[in-house]
């Protein structure tokens, strides 16, 4: 399975200074989510949207140094779209990012792409235990090709630290 995507490569490279030492673990997470999207939704017209959403969905963790990263991530994405002639995708990709941690099914505008992106992230966050009917062998192949490199441990530490700082809102990214 090929995993090179020019949009992902270019965008991630532009954020390399902000991401720093976490670059490889985030890059692998971005690609796993992106490839899960392609595995679920075969509509070629959505590939670029998934690439953009995958890069930006968690980027606020680094750009704004916060675990409450949904709005900072959306702000970064909006700036990119505005400056790259893709403003018409703003609402759809905003919904993809905003709802990507939703625990239940998303029903609303842009349902196909938002729900696909939500499922794709949950497949990765669950380490492939949740598949939403996607081919398990392909999920395993993607995870082998793009190892975790401690991404989930990194997130767990951030969430744990946030729990002590904000015990009444330990998971602000969940909607």
Image (cartoon, helix red, strand yellow):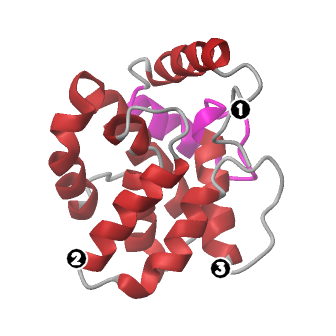
Mark in front: 2 vs 1: 2
Image point (23%, 36%), residue name: 18
Q: Would you say 110 lies left or right of 20 here?
A: right
Whether the residues at callouts 1 and 3 have beta carbons within 8 Å, the answer is: no
What is the distance, in whole Å, between disc 2 and disc 1 at their CAs?
A: 38 Å
Q: In terms of secondary structure, where does tag 1 sit?
A: loop
Mark in front: 1 vs 3: 3
Spot occupied by residue 100 in the image (x, y as percentages of width and height)? 63, 53
Q: From this viewpoint, is residue 72 visible? A: yes
Residue 84 image-quadrant placement: bottom left
Vertical arrangement, residue 60 with respect to residue 76, above or below: above
What is the distance, in whole Å, between disc 1 and disc 3 at their CAs?
A: 26 Å
Spot occupied by residue 75 in the image (x, y as percentages of width and height)? 41, 60
Whether the residues at callouts 2 and 1 have beta carbons within 8 Å, the answer is: no
Spot occupied by residue 156 in the image (x, y as percentages of width and height)? 57, 18
Q: In terms of secondary structure, where does tag 2 sit?
A: helix
Q: Mark 2 or mark 1, which has the lower sequence index?
A: 2
Chain part drawn in magenta: 124-147
Residue 110: image tag = 3
Residue 137 included in the magenta stretch of the image? yes
Q: From this viewpoint, is residue 44 visible? A: no
Vertical arrangement, residue 159 with respect to residue 134, above or below: above
Mark in front: 3 vs 2: 2
Q: Mark 1 or mark 3, which has the lower sequence index?
A: 3
Q: 10 Å neighbourhood of mark 2: few (<14), some, or many (≥20)?
A: few
Residue 83: image tag = 2
What is the distance, in whole Å, between disc 3 and disc 2 at their CAs?
A: 23 Å
């Amino acid at each position: 399975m090929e995993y090179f995507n020019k949009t992902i490569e270019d965008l991630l490279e532009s954020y390399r200074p902000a991401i720093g030492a976490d670059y490889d673990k985030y890059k692998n997470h971005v690609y796993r989510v992106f490839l899960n999207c392609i595995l679920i939704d075969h509509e070629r017209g959505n590939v670029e949207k998934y690439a953009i959403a995958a890069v930006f969905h968690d980027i606020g963790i680094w750009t704004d140094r916060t675990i409450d990263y949904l709005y900072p991530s959306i702000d970064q994405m909006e700036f990119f779209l505005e400056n790259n002639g893709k403003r018409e995708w703003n609402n759809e990709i905003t919904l993809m990012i905003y709802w990507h941690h939703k625990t239940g099914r998303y029903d609303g505008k842009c349902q196909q792409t938002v729900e696909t992106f939500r499922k794709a992230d949950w497949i990765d966050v669950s380490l492939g235990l949740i598949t939403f009917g996607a081919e398990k062998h392909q999920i395993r192949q993607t995870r082998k090709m793009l190892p975790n490199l401690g991404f989930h441990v990194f997130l767990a530490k951030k969430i744990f630290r946030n729990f002590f700082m904000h015990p009444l809102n330990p998971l602000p990214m969940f909607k």
